[in-house]
Amino acid sequence: MNRYPRLMLTAAASGSGKTLLTCGILQALCDRGLHVTSFKCGPDYIDPMFHARVIGTKSRNLDTFFTDEDTTRGLFVRGAQKADVSVIEGVMGYYDGLGGTSVKASSYDTARVTDTPVVLIVNCRGMSLSVLALVKGFLEFRRDSRIRGVILNQCSERIYSEMEKLLRKELDVRAYGYVPSVPELQLKSRHLGLVTPDEVEGLRENLRRLGQTLERTLDIDGLLELARTAPEIEDGGRSSDGVKGHARIETDESAPRIAVARDEAFCFLYEENLDLLRELGAELKFFSPLHDGELPQADGLLLYGGYPELYARQLSENRSMRESIRRALERGLPCMAECGGFMYLQEELEDMNGVSHAMVGALAGRSFYTKKLSRFGYVALRPQKDQMLGTDIGEIRAHEFHYFDSTACGDAFHAQKPQRADGWECIQGSASCIAGFPHLYYNSNPEIAVRFLKKCIQRKKNSL
């Protein structure tokens, strides 16, 4: 076991400023010359993009619904290698978990599994002494809350000086500083969450300014001291040879090359999914359905989610790319597509203004805007028809989060909501392709990656 300095930043609710404050603290730590890694609790894609813009390397997710405790710890250790300190950003309110009625898969659960000290961010707008009541409730709701301190957000220096003394006197809890209101540094949102970092004008300079501000108003030395109190942590059985016995896939030929869509329209990628594919022996080739002329030569194709609805006209106008993908899939190129990628492979996609655009046409169906979240949240998938991954693959953990629906969602799998009776059919499946709205988390069942790559290797051998 090793000791990996770490801390979690959490809050009482969404909208408390966690992401911006996390980015500011990451910036302040990087400005000190520290090697920093970051993580996001839950299935969020966009917050890790902001983290990555600060630290200059990929941020990763930790989710105790997706993975068991050993695997969750292993994923943390893998990401924290060689870091001076790791910062984990919480999701929603600290105790909010499955179904809104359980702490399972909450930020608290992740802190418990990784044995991480926690700092509670309290948005003080409209509050003074009530701050203590809120903090007291979070400290006492679970005996092992792991909350070791607080940061007061949207708080003046005068109010902070008073609250800091009261927090220490009344609750014996340490305050690690305050964050003044900085309206020009707020992050804007859209229908799937925050806008992406590339859409924020002057983001790098604003984050540098925020880091400098927090160096003055937060106790950064104290936060580092707290992170270093984190106990040793087991590696969860993860090694350089893969996850829990899944070694590299042996092949007589060169590594299978997987084309992975990655651009403004397709940007929702779990780095842990890509890491697992590489560990199993895959070579990843990134390409842009928006900007490139055709699909690169590859043995398999991955189309993840993103915002194809915002770029529907450009995607449609790139006819050479659409046709090259359609021809490749018609010839049996193994493919997995999720949410936005699934919408792109269908016949038509309706944009945010209700205008339909021709898409790849490799799959039946038309995707359309519903103006509300459809089938939102975690799901457990079970195959109910034969398809590329087989009927014996077992349970796959995933989540759905989309304002679009389709006339042909598929019925190869059954999706079951955890702790609820709700369920539905999903995913179009064939011998060489699975495509649907659920975002799959490969480490929940590494056979996803293993079987996909074996299909790719077989396809490569058959093409020689």
Image (cartoon, helix red, strand yellow):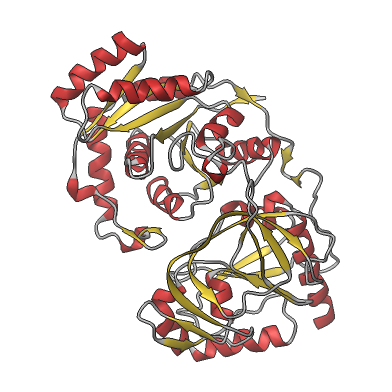
Q: Pinpoint residue 256: horizontal percent, then vertical percent.
A: 73, 68
Residue 257: image quadrant is bottom right
406 lies left or right of 414: left
Up-down relation of residue 42 to residue 332 (above or below):
above
* Residue 93 figure quarter: top left
For residue 439, above or below residue 352: above
Q: Is residue 336 visible?
A: no
Residue 54 on image: x %, y %: 37, 47
Quarter where residue 269 is shown: bottom right
| Residue at 78% across, 71% down | 388
The image shows residue 453 at horizontal and vertical percentages of 76, 65
Q: In the orientation shown, which residue stands out farthest toward the front?
A: 421
Q: Residue at x 68, y 85 (%)?
A: 328
| Quarter containing the C terminus | bottom right
Depth check, front residue: 92 or 200: 92
Q: Is residue 366 left or right of residue 18?
A: right
Which one is nearer the viewer's eye here, 364 or 8?
364
Query: Does residue 262 show up?
Result: yes
Residue 365 position in % (x across, y down): 59, 84
Image position of 431 (left or right of 34): right
